[in-house]
Amino acid sequence: MPSATISCASAPGRTQCWSACSARPRRCRAPSCRSHRSRAPCSGATSISLARGLAPGGRLICLEVDETYAGIARANLADAGVADRVEIRVGPAEAALRAIPEEPVFDLVFIDADKPAYPAYYELVLPRVRPGGLILLDNMLQGGRVLEPDTDSARVVAELNHRIHDDERVDMALVLVADGLTFVRKRPPA
């Protein structure tokens, strides 16, 4: 079975996880899911869940801007017994994403990070997602503020919702769970 990689990236003061694994994660229920990528705040909690779902040989690589938060995550990962599957690298998210070859290797991406950067993360991730793969974006309702955006964050998220809706490369569904979760399925090439 091929090895797997999950990488986590962050904004200052928060770790966000990007994951990708070439091997089938045992907890992934999507048909033919071979890899997933997640971007979500974590002091190790999201990374722990992802690491526990990795297939044998899977690796989780986390990118954190702040060494202090990276240390907290390392300790939590060790306490959970998954540190052997996780590597935390200190560095900025966008640079880390740009460093990943622009080829489809991910089946699932979960984005839950600094909202103003969502559009950049979406565009950086999409070429790296396999056809039929999913991108999940959290907090896409912004407490209802996307209907009448009154903050920069709500404006960015509202615009991204419309942009994804009109994006011919994908299909989308916004699920009314918690603060809104957008499912984006990458279409196969025409």
Image (cartoon, rainbow, N blue to C red):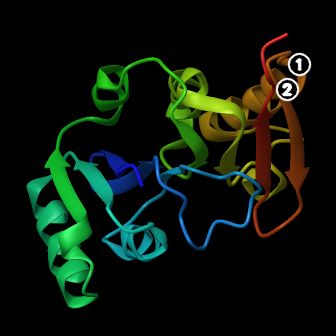
Q: Nearer the viewer, residue 179 or 133?
A: 133
Q: Is residue 96 left or right of residue 154?
A: left
Residue shown at the point (67%, 47%) measured from the top left = 137
Q: Identify the residue position indicated by label 1 in the image.
A: 166
Secondary structure beneath disc 2? helix
Residue 28, image x, y percentages:
64, 66
Residue shown at the point (80%, 27%) measured from the top left = 164
Residue 22, image x, y percentages:
46, 47
Q: Nearer the viewer, residue 160 or 79?
A: 79
C-alpha distance separating marks 2 and 1 = 6 Å
Report if the CB atoms under discs 2 and 1 are less than 8 Å apart: yes
As displayed, is residue 125 above or below residue 24?
above
Q: Quadrant of the N terminus?
A: bottom left
Q: Identify the residue position indicated by label 2 in the image.
A: 162
Q: Which of pointers 2 and 1 indicates the residue nearer the eye?
A: 1
Q: Amino acid at mark 2?
A: His
Mark 1, Cα crowd under 10 Å, few <14 / some 14-19 / many 20+, is few
